[in-house]
Image: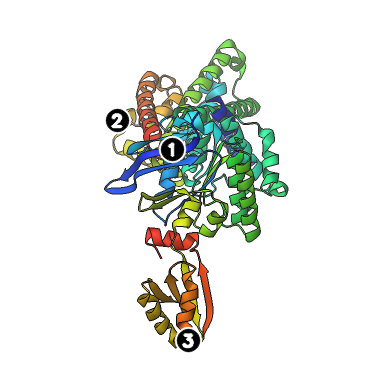
Amino acid sequence: MSNTAISVSDLSKKYGERMAVSHASFEVPLGTICGFVGPNGSGKTTTMRMLLGLITPTGGTGEILGESIEHPEKYLPRVGAMIEGPAFYPAMSGSENLKYLAELGGFPTNRVQHLLDQVGLGDRSKSKYKTYSLGMKQRLGIAAALLPDPKLLMLDEPTNGLDPEGIQEVRALLRQLANDGTSVFVSSHLLSELELISDYLVMLRKGEVVFTGKMMELMVNAQPVIIAKAAHDGDLVVLLEIAQKAGHHAVIRDGALHVEGPAQWAVEFNRAAFDAGITLSQLTPQLPNLEETFFEMTGEK
Amino acid sequence: MWRVALSELRKLRRPTLFLGTMGAVIFFSALFSSLLFLLIDSPDGNSDRGRTVGREVLGLATGVVQGFSNVGGFLGIIALCVFAAQTAQEYTYGTLRNILVRQPGRMRVLVGKFIAMNLFALIMITLSGLISVSASILLAPRAKVSTELWFTGDGRQALLTTFINITVSVIGFGTIGMVLGLLLRSPISAISFGVLWLLIVENLLIAVKNSLQDWLPGAQLTAIASGGAQRGFSDGIEYSHALLVGGIYVAVGALVASLLFVRRDVSN
């Protein structure tokens, strides 16, 4: 039995002359939450569609739950998915829409009400889908993905349109599912969200995988930064010179000096500033968050 | 395949679609049959394209299904619209990806949907038959049409034959609707194209060159519904010819659309 939920090798998709996904290779271990990040148009949704058998890869291979992606019928009964937002029949109620999908997939329809309760739509289950807010539609999409009691859950931007409370609930739900053994593969443009819940990360840029591995590995290898503010803004230029003379890369951004260097160097920097007659109003050593690391790795702003 | 059909029926039985369609079927079946008897003495005719169907013809064993037969082509147009809308809306709503994730066997999806929609069409045809025959029986005495032969074995045979002919024709129209839905991927485009072609373009072409009616798909399917030329109401298209040419149109269309559906990437 394979211990990976998703495993792809050299997976590619070409539309005309444009490579939407280029030789992507990565693995997602079973039972983890894997964040799937990349700028718009980087190939995340195309990759997910290939994994779900909706589009045919131009090249490469892949396995989902130990089965080849050439035979989606072998693994899809154990996979829940919401791709590119929720899509349901507007004239049918939330409950009817889920029963439709349950009958289609051969899942018991008596799970429907429980799932609607689980995503907080229990009291609106009889309302027509077209009357739902964006957040409610998103919740219904998540409920639909949970219909098969999945071993692998693939969600594309699941927190789109949700309020902060809803985002927190989805985060808790995904964590609970992972604790119960479900593997979760989730894409989101809210990197702070992924940073909070992901164990694993796959990062795409222009169709190519630029990082794959544990979230901790990415963050540990990230260059720490010291952020300094002077009592007088004019002193920032002098501080920049001090940092550069000490051999550190530094930039002035948003009224503060950002110096790449270990946290310990902050003490030395503070002393040098004092010797130069500069009073610091802030001196904070910090690790870059996922968003900053993402921008650095993908070259995006 | 049966799971697809069962779930598709859940969509087809929703009140707006089911009651709306059946309401239209009841209205037009009653209208077509009523006009046949109410306008029997009208100089402008009592049947399609101003033709007159007299008391002698209506008094035959086949007279009981004359109204039903007349409405057959119209049932085909309704079927075309329903099949086209139900197929194409999966693309416009984006629900096709949900369907294929839950049922990756694409031919199974197609056949399951086809079975469900044919069941829907069968209900439509049965209801239309009931209304047409009932209206004919009710209005025949008033129009002084003899109903003696209607209740003989020949009358029952005519009813069965017409029911089968209309079913074949409606399935043909429905399949064309489904093919258009798959090819155009938009309910509005599929229905507009289908209805415009069948109601306007074909009639214009036939008006310009009458012999074209032997080769146009809508004319063949309408001829099948009315039983073909031997009954004398279809301007000369023979039943066997209509069945062959219409069958070829439907089979080729279904084959091309199925191949496209099975192989095409689902990227919306």
In this figure, which residue is indicated by the disc labeled 3? A278
Decide which of B260, B210 is in the foreground and name it: B260
Percent position of residue B79, x then y: 50, 34
Q: Amino acid at mark 2?
A: Ser
In this figure, which residue is indicated by the disc labeled 2? B211
Q: Looking at the image, is mark 1 or mark 2 nearer the viewer? A: 1
Q: Amino acid at mark 1?
A: Ser
**Colour logic:** rainbow
Percent position of residue A213, x then y: 45, 47
Q: Disc 3 on helix, strand or loop?
A: loop
Percent position of residue B77, x then y: 48, 36
- Tell me if mark 3 has few (under 14), some (14-19) or many (20+) residues whose alpha carbon lies within 10 angstroms of its own: some
**How far is the residue under mark 1 from the one under mark 2?**
62 Å
**How far is the residue under mark 1 from the one under mark 3?**
54 Å
Using the image, determine if residue B49 lies above or below residue A22.
above
| Left or right, A217 with reference to A249 | right
Q: Disc 2 on helix, strand or loop?
A: helix
Q: Are marks 2 and 3 on the same chain?
A: no
Q: Are marks 1 and 3 on the same chain?
A: yes
Instruction: Give the numbered dot on residue A80.
Output: none
Q: Looking at the image, is mark 1 or mark 3 nearer the viewer? A: 3
Chain letter, disc 2 residue:
B
Compare marks 1 and 3 and give the one earlier in the sequence.
Answer: 1
The image quarter containing residue A163 is: bottom right
